[in-house]
Amino acid sequence: MDEAKITRLCQIAPKYGLTLAHEGLVITKVNGKATSLDTTKYMPDQFIDLLAQIIATNMKADLWQWQ
């Protein structure tokens, strides 16, 4: 992924319940939590799948904490 795609991904992520921050090609925050996800290690589809897993994990955590 190039930096233009990462910037675009950060712009559209809130539509899907995520906030992302990046420095160059590294995602530095997901939903305000510090991280270091080097996007050069993923194909674009793989990285989007990883983000989908983060959304699913957050939904599961919310479900179990609901009571």
Image (cartoon, rainbow, N blue to C red):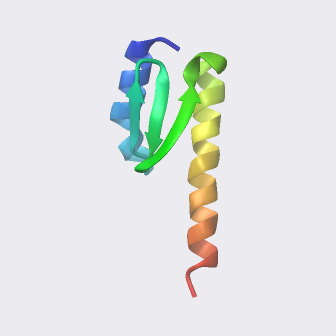
The residue at the point 49 percent across, 25 percent down is 26
The residue at the point 47 percent across, 44 percent down is 34
Drawn side of residue 6 relative to residue 56, left or right: left
Instruction: Name the quadrant containing residue 4.
Output: top left
Q: Position of residue 43 (x, y in %)?
A: 64, 18
Q: Position of residue 24 (x, y in %)?
A: 41, 18
Nearer to me, 64 or 41 = 41
Furthest toward the bottom, the residue is 67
Furthest toward the top, the residue is 2
Instruction: Name the quadrant containing residue 5.
Output: top left
Q: Quadrant of the C terminus?
A: bottom right
Drawn side of residue 45 relative to residue 28, left or right: right
Q: Position of residue 50 (x, y in %)?
A: 63, 37
The residue at the point 64 percent across, 46 percent down is 53
How many tags in the picture?
0
